[in-house]
Amino acid sequence: MSDAALIVLDPSDRPDPWADLIGQADAAKRLELAAASPVHAYLLLGQPGSGTVAAAFGFASLVLSSHLAGEGAARARRLARSGRHPDLVVIEPEGAALRVDEAVDIIRAGQTSPVEGPRKVIVVHGVDVIVEAAIGKLLKLIEEPPPSMVFVLLAESVPPEIATIASRCVTIEFGPIARQVLEAALVARGISPGRAKAAAAACGGDLDRAVLLAGDDALAARAALWQAIPDRLDGRGVTVWELVAQVRDAMDAAQEPLVARQQTETDALDARVEQTGERGAGRPQLVARHKREVRRLRVDELRFGLATMARVYRDRLLEGPSARDETALVAIQRSAKSLVRNPNELLLLQALLLTLGE
């Protein structure tokens, strides 16, 4: 089976649980084999856009339909993949970290029995950014889980603080999606080959970002802006402020397609609430996800820009050694690494460009 292949089940058991997952056939196969008789906890490990979220919902749809057949199974899968199955609980951090009150929500969900079937699935986002005070609570629940519970934890990495939690889970890794797989997926969505190629090259193996970039008319202009910065720096603070303002304006513009898509999702939720009521609609989870998506987009834009500038300095070094260019490259790499700590965007850019302009 190729990397681009999707796992397709018996047509009578549609919808396909892996319809939203590309380039992760091995992970999908492991989860499919596990779904009939799952253990208590799984850790899906991968960068944003690698498919961990789609895989979590696909796996949940299999687990929650495993005791059913025909239309009953199809209904359970449809509800689970859309996040609306009564035996699927999704916990998403509202801020930058998974807090104690959210750990309490996980415990509360774990203490209630399934509604429709023999199992309940609890999907927890952001386990790698859990606050220290919540780690013990989550660990205790995973170490002593109710027999009907299946936990699916999502994380980008395994920092030392959650190593014990990770050791209690079956870990399934998701690598960045291959560029050619992303290109094919975008073309299949009706994106022109040229746009698909450019978006796949700039997205860092992230399908969600590739989709956004494919519809971004200003992608080339932003790349050119970042690429021109080294030559525009002249040692003056006013130049730095102007460049930072231009970069942030460009990032704001890049955010507009995401905001438009989020508004569509909010409108759909409002329409559903009008029909069925607010209870169980998932508004807090949607708001939290939207905040994370915006934060992630801006970090991705910074990574893209820093990588673009770094290539300029690398190209210069290929032409001949330069202590100044080497220092600049180190400064850019340091700034890129600092993004994991969610630094202040304005201060990071100002400090970096002041250093590069010295």
Image (spheres, helix red, strand yellow):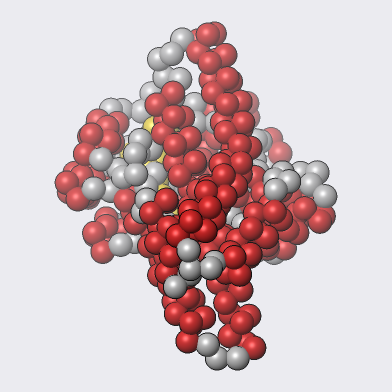
88 lies above or below 228:
above
Q: Which residue is drawn at 58% across and 20% down?
A: 268
Q: Which residue is drawn at 26% across and 64% down?
A: 160
Q: From what the image shows, is residue 146 above or below residue 278?
A: below
**Residue 95 seen from this side:** yes
Which residue appears at 54% of the width and 8% of the height? 275
Position of 170 with respect to 312 (left or right) is left
- Residue 303 percent location from the top left of the image: 52, 60
Q: Nearer the viewer, residue 17 or 94?
A: 94
In the rendered image, the vertical position of residue 110 relative to residue 142, given as above or below: above
Give residue 114's position: percent from left, percent from top: 36, 28
Which quadrant: the C terminus? bottom left
Q: Where is residue 352 in the image (x, y as percent from the top left)?
A: 43, 64
Say how many tags the image has.
0
Nearer to me, 245 or 204: 245
Vertical side of 253 occupied by 341: above or below: below
Which of the pair 148/139 is nearer the observer?
Answer: 139
Quick check: can you spot residue 172?
A: no
Q: Where is residue 24 in the image (x, y as percent from the top left)?
A: 59, 58
Image quarter hosting the N terminus: bottom right
- Quarter residue 199 falls in: bottom right
- Most foreground residue, 107 or 148: 107
At horizontal 31% and vertical 45% (from top left) the residue drawn is: 97
Left or right: 213 as drawn, with respect to 32: right
